[in-house]
Amino acid sequence: MITSVLVANRGEIACRIFRTCRELGIRTVAVHSDPDATALHTRVADTAVRLPGAAPADTYLRADLIVKAAVASGADAVHPGYGFLSENADFARAVLDAGLVWIGPPPAAIEAMASKMRAKQLMGIAPLADVTPADLPVLVKAAAGGGGRGMRIVRRLEDLDSALSSARAEAASAFGDGEVFVEPYVEDGRHVEVQLLADTHGTVWALGTRDCSLQRRHQKVIEEAPAPGLSDELIEELHDLAVRAARAVDYVGAGTVEFLVADGRAHFLEMNTRLQVEHPVTEAVFDVDLVAEQIRIAEGAALPDEPPRARGHAIEARLYAEDPARDWTPQTGTLHQLSVPASVRLDTGYEDGDLIPVHYDPMLAKVVAYAPTRAEAVRKLAGALERARIHGPVTNRDLLLNSLRHKEFTTARMDTGFYDRHLPELMEPAADLLAPLAAALSDAVGRSRFGGFRNLPSAPQTKRYEMAGEEHEVRYRHTRNGLEADGVRVLHADASGVVLEVEGVQRKFEVKRYGDQVYVGGMALKSLPRFPDPTAQLAPGSLLAPTPGTVVRVADGLGEGSAVEAGQPLLWLEAMKMEHKITAPHAGTLSELNAVVGQQVTVGSLLAVVEPA
């Protein structure tokens, strides 16, 4: 029997595995980088082992250090979670060679399927060797890993070399393996996958389907189980193909086979030899704990001949610290508050007051809703996200909420082109125009030492806020009876909340402050100074860092005095395991280049200046 498990991962998935281990009475061991020394997964584990350094390549990708940590901590088993080393056959062998239990598939199965290129060959599908105009569009794809990293769509042949270089660099950084391949790109298909669970006695379960079509940068955003609208014949075909893939490599444990479905046909994508981020929707529908089953299988237990029956519907939304309006730029900083209604499941690696680091994936949490029907699950999840309190860096919450309520999603007519078609409208925040007034009234009461009493009528007070990218000015005044605002009756106001009445309808507003950042319910506002301070003017064509990160590449031959074209790539930043390309805003001359490979930059750092032609 397993008595102690080290999780070779961080954040949300480590916390989620620890939760099951505690329920099973298993001792837990965390590993952590220096930025994660006080992270939630480190705090909740029974034991924690330091991996010196910050970058994944120096810490969470160091198989030797992790095996050493497992042995030193007295763990008798290792669970890889997902990402990092979860699909690394050499790591699995190192764990087994150290005399530890590996909670995952056999190394040979990982090896056969971990390379997406070799997996396709195993399924009788060959990648493209020589790309011609007739093959376009194509997809450049990392052979290892997942999560959309190391993937590029190429629609013009002249962009292929750049896409290959960029994908290799990103894949090497994220997975320690820069191998990539090219395959045909299926436009606007549905991304459907099958959850597998296999034991060492020859039983393989196909635990239904999931739809993961809503993606940005090939990274899944909203997932659900079962995949809606599939025919019984197609579901049977998907299950058969998935089980065939598992049996072809003598698979053991939890795994997922992914497909693109277009025109009623299934196109094999890959097999992920690990637990998926979206596994909670399958758990909800089948009433099973996949992590517990992984542990039992690793202990040699047999699965029943037949899997449990599915019932109901579950939907998961991934909450990211990123700004969709600014090319999905990752955000860092302090997460002051993260709370959702108890009616939904929250899997997270953060607690109130935690710092979101720059070195890792920007996912804050997964919010999961289960209900008897799809429509009820959609409503439940949307309602929970609307009521959630997420105070801190910018997130994709508004995008998630608008996606769930979009007609194309509610009627289950979405595909992988959903965000390409609808992104601008989906980024519109649900701004409440009374929020700035509530913030101003709360602030006025919180700062006042004399209450609302005045011998003479006071002049109107003004306050300015930035909300949803727009500036709002509100007016109010102090009277003998308290605070007043035109067209609004102030029923109550204090530092933590305001109650207003508009045309006979009462509105309650919860107010919280963190410096100049104000949150009215779930709406973020920034308090603006009455008289803005003069600021230094930047030269035209100044390129500022959109996110904290590391300069990983500068375009070949680029230097001060170089002539550049509009849109020409100049340099690349890496932040939260993603590459961000910085391009010339217009044609001109590179008059200043401050970026050096390996340099750490903060938000707003001046990287370069392109003088207009």
Image: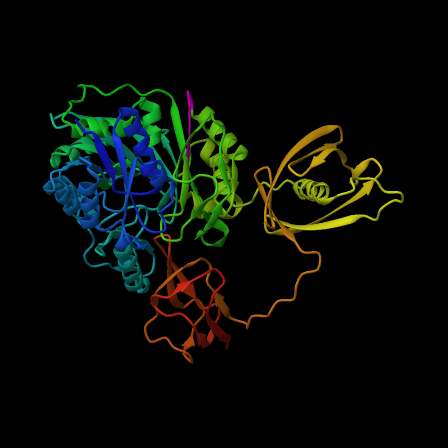
Question: Which residue is drawn at the image coordinates 67% and 61% (left, top)?
Answer: 532
The stretch of residues the image draws in magenta is 367-373
How many labels sit on residues? 0
Q: Is residue 229 above or below residue 329?
A: above
- Residue at x-position 50% and y-position 51%: 325
The main secondary structure of the magenta stretch is strand
Q: Residue at position x 22%, y 49% from top?
A: 144
Give the x, y percent position of residue 404.
Answer: 47, 35
Q: Is residue 368 magenta?
A: yes
272 or 303, nearer to the observer: 303
Expressed as whole percent of the image width and height from the top left, the position of residue 494 reads 69, 36
Residue 116 appears at what percent x and percent y? 21, 47
- Quadrant location of the N terminus in the rendered image: top left
Image location (x, y in percent) of residue 338: 48, 38
Left or right of 526, for residue 30: left
Quarter of the image where one finds residue 6: top left
From what the image shows, is residue 507 above or below residue 96? Answer: above
Q: Nearer the viewer, residue 148 or 367?
A: 367
Q: Residue furthest bottom?
A: 561
- Inspect the magenta stretch and tell me whether residue 389 lies in it: no
Q: In the rendered view, does 330 fall on the left or right side of 269? A: right
Give the answer, above or below, for where 532 lies relative to 74. Answer: below
**Residue 606 seen by the camera:** yes
Q: Is residue 355 left or right of residue 209?
A: right
Which quadrant holds residue 119? top left
Residue placed at 46% from the left, 29% from the top? 378
Q: Quadrant of residue 243?
A: top left
